[in-house]
Structures are given as structure tokens and as C-alpha cells.
Image (cartoon, rainbow, N blue to C red):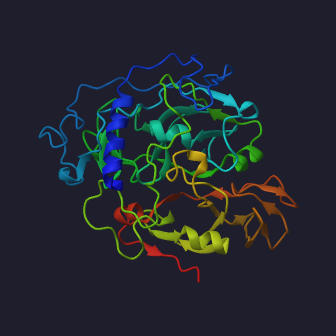
Amino acid sequence: MSRRASLLATALLLLAACGSPADDPTDASAGTETGIVSTNSVLLEEVTGSPPEEVPSALERIDDPALPEPLVDPAEVISGGPPPDGIPPIDTPRFVPAASVNWLTPDEPVLAPAIGETARAYPVRIMIWHEVVNDSIDGRPVVVTYCPLCNSALAFDRRLGDRVLTFGTSGLLYRSDLVMYDRQTESLFSQIEGRAIAGVLAGAELERIPVQTVTWAQWQQANPDGWVLSRETGVSRDYGANPYTGYDSPDGSPFLFEGEPDPRLPAMQRVAGLGAAEDPVAVPLADLVETGVVELTVGGGPVVVWAVEGLRSPLDEQRVHQGRSVGATGAFDPVVDGDPLRFTRDGDHFVDAGTGSRWNVLGQAVDGPLAGTRLEPVDHLDTFWFAWAAFHPTTRIADLG
């Protein structure tokens, strides 16, 4: 079977799996590869949203004449297989203390939003099956998202004007990327763009919250008192499995992507993208892992981008924790107390030349004169080249030579 045929079969399997009724989350066989379900999960904060509105739905008809004109060609917004919410978003996320987690392996990926007094981690082994988590952190309504086809993790504030939105999975793709919809107006949102591309809210943009993809060990070491998204999601899934086996192939091609990918780099090469619409720049991940640190000017300001080895791809082997090593990245404003710092990598940490302080991949000084200091994160996106270039066609490619 070809890889494309295999992925089509996967989409059908996801559709069938996600349409099945939810199992009792207290069943020891539900939703875990280990047969163990935590009994100490808690609901940290209630997730609320504004009431649904009686307006025309772009989810039902993207080109409804009663709606504003879509911002993209409706023909480019195509079905990915499952129906709306066929890939079920998590609307009542439960969390477990980091110290109690024994079902994650050191090098597998977790998503780490830069928000909240107490950190939260969202394991990719869960996100790969749900893609959207509606949450609230320190009273701030947020949505954490992950698109497997683009390997793109982004988080947003759910507030838009007077509305507090809650999001679902539309079952649609735009340039192979997740299209979300809000349950208040049923407008369609492009994940990578973070904006409504069709519906009553067309043109509205969500506020980005920086998020990193790092290893479980890196996050746990930095946040021993943090919270981890629980496997008690209300549905039964094998949260150790990768339903996109083989997708992360360096010589492969994107799934359900219309047109030709930008030829400057291989389509499935991983990059760290920065600058968004203002000054887009792509940093090839393999080069960054080899170099360790690169200093850039993005949007007129200094940015340090760094990487360490160890993070495994969740889209490679049949089990998430067995994927090939691809590396974890971070992007930060290097200025502390008015002074720009310069960094070099030292093992799995980074050292600034000015004070000799050591920093972890999350931008925290762990020892030295600046211990306890945190660098200000800069929005960046770890993704495949085809996706970054499709949404940022004027992007430059950083030369790390």
C-alpha cells in the first residue's frame, strides 16, 4: 500500500474510531496503552464560553451569500475525512500532578504554553487524537491546538471582543492544516493563521500565546510542581499510538495539500518559523540542532533561537515514544535588564557569555548569577517547511552556515 493510500485509510479509521461512543473514563482499559488510568485527575478551572448565536453557519456552507465573503478560495477548504468534531476536542480537560505521571517517556513531546503561574503540559500522545483543548489558565480562556498533518502546535486566547469562544474540529483542511470552528457563530478558523477565514467573524484574529514543543523530561525537570493533561478525556483511545505512522518522512509529501510546495526546501523538512506576516523567517531544524544557537533580527528586534537534541517525532513510528530524534527548539528575546545576552550551547543547556549562567531549553536560568530569570518567549512555530511556506510565501530562510 502506498503512503498516500495508507493515510487515506488512516483518515477512515479515525472517522470510525471517533464516531464510536465514549467509554467510561474510569475503565482501566480506556484510552491508555498501559491499562492504567489515573485516579487523581482534577478539573483545575471551569471552561466556559458565550452562548451560541443565531447567525448563518460557515461550517454548514462556507459560501453562504448571507455571510461575508470568505477570505480564501472556498475550493481550497476541503474535507479531511471526519465530520465536525469527529476528531473530538477536549472541552473539560482534567489534569494530574507531574509527580504522579509514569506513562510518559523522557524524550517524547509535550506542548508547553508560556502562560500561568503553575505550568501545564499537554502530551502530544493525547493531542494527536484530539487536536483541540478548550481550557482556562489562571482565569484566562485559552485553546491549545495541534495539527498532526503540519506538526503545528499553537495556543490562543479564546476571547474575541465581547465573546468567549469555544472551538471544535471542523473536519476540514486548508493547505493541509487544521480548520477549527467556534461554537458561538460557527465561523471557520485557520489554525496556523489564527484567524477566521469564513463566517460571521471572517477577518478576526485570535491573540497568540507562545507555546513550545519540548521533551517530557525537559518540561518535568523545569516544572516538578506542574500539571499534565490527563488521559481521562471521556473517550477511549490508544494514547501511545501514532495514527499517522510514517508521515514524518524527510523525502515524503504532505497529505491533501493542493498545489506544489515551495521548492526551496524539501516539503517535509522541519523548520522553526518566526516573524509571521511581518517578517517571516524559517530556520531549518537540522541545521539549528547542529549549530545549537542562532541570533536573528526579526521584525526589527533581536531574537535568539536555539535547539537541543532528544525530542522524538510523534509522526514517525507506530508508537509515539519510538519516533526518530528531531530536536526541541526555543525562541526568545535575549535582552535582560537592558543588556543583550549571547549564548552558546553546552550539552542540553545554554550558557550566556556575560554572566556564565546556565539556561534550559524553556528559557529559564537554572544556575549562575541570573538563576531564576526567565527570557521573554518569542512566538515561533515548529512545523514542516511546506506548511510554513504555504502560509508565509515571502519567508526568508536563515543561513546558519
Q: Nearer the viewer, residue 87 or 48?
A: 87
| Residue in the picture at 68% in, 34% down | 227
Does 332 appear above or below 215? below
Q: Position of residue 161 (x, y in %)?
A: 40, 38
Seen from the viewer's position, the closer of residues 229 and 378 is 229
Image quadrant of residue 14? top left
- Can residue 196 be seen at all in this image of the molecule? no
Give the farthest residue toward the front: 1
In the displayed structure image, the side of residue 283 where residue 252 appears, left or right? left
Q: Residue furthest left?
A: 65
Residue 383 percent coordinates (x, y): 48, 59
In what quadrant of the picture does the C terminus appear? Answer: bottom right
User: In the image, what residue occupies the spot 69% across and 54% down?
Assistant: 362
Q: Nearer the viewer, residue 17 or 139?
A: 17
Judging depth in this view, the residue of 200 and 180 nearest the camera is 180
Q: Is residue 287 left or right of residue 269?
A: right
Please indicate whether residue 39 sits to the left or right of residue 236 in the image: right
For residue 233, above or below residue 58:
above
For the point 33% across and 55% down, the residue is: 2
> As drawn, is 377 to the left or to the right of 279?
right
Residue extending furthest toward the bottom = 401
